[in-house]
Image (cartoon, rainbow, N blue to C red):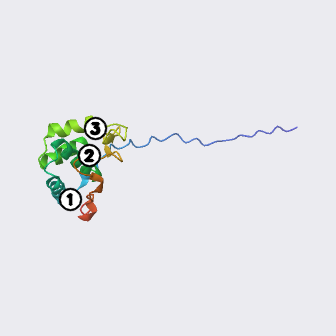
Amino acid sequence: MQKWSLDIVIAVTPAVPTAPIEPYVSPAERWTSQQKGRFIQELQHLVDSLPATSNKHDRAIVAIHFCIKARVDMASLLRGYLRLVGFNTGHISSLPQHETGDRPEGNHWTRNKAGRYTNTPFRRCRATDPFALEPFTPSVVQRNGR
């Protein structure tokens, strides 16, 4: 009687480590100088067009909504751009901290673990309705210098 042996070979591929997840980079950080200049003009126009009777807190909220909608969505970028149009950086630094959370009826923004802010839907401020404003889109000028 002949004995049979059956050798089964299974190829095992060791798990290849994947590349580390890249940190979040805001699209606004990749804008050309022309796109940045256009955005600053649009932001200044927005701030200048707000009612003179609105207080600085409401004006800042509207400007931050506009920035976030244009993907200027990191705290450092918000401070930098809003400083250029006349806002106090201390005020701009503290405002998102106090108005950020996960309650749509009580917060203006949410913030993810990467530090990216997003506008909370359905929240309105007294100065004007930021969602009714035409958003800035870098594609109007040129995207990434092309």
Amino acid beneath label 1:
Gln
Is residue 143 at all visible to an observer of this figure? no
* Amino acid type indicated by mark 3: Glu
Q: Circle 2 — which element?
A: loop
* Residue 49 image label: none
- Numbered marks: total: 3
Per the image, the residue denoted by label 3 is: 99
Q: How far is disc 3 from disc 2 in space, using C-alphas?
A: 12 Å
Q: Earlier in the sequence, mark 2 or mark 1?
A: 1
Q: Earlier in the sequence, mark 3 or mark 2?
A: 3
- Quick check: 17 left or right of 12? left
Examine the image and state in which quarter residue 61 appears: top left
Disc 1 + disc 3, Cβ < 8 Å:
no
Mark 1 vs mark 3: in front: 3
Residue at disc 1, secondary structure: helix
Q: Which residue is mark 1?
A: 35
Is 118 left or right of 59, judged from the image as shown?
Answer: right
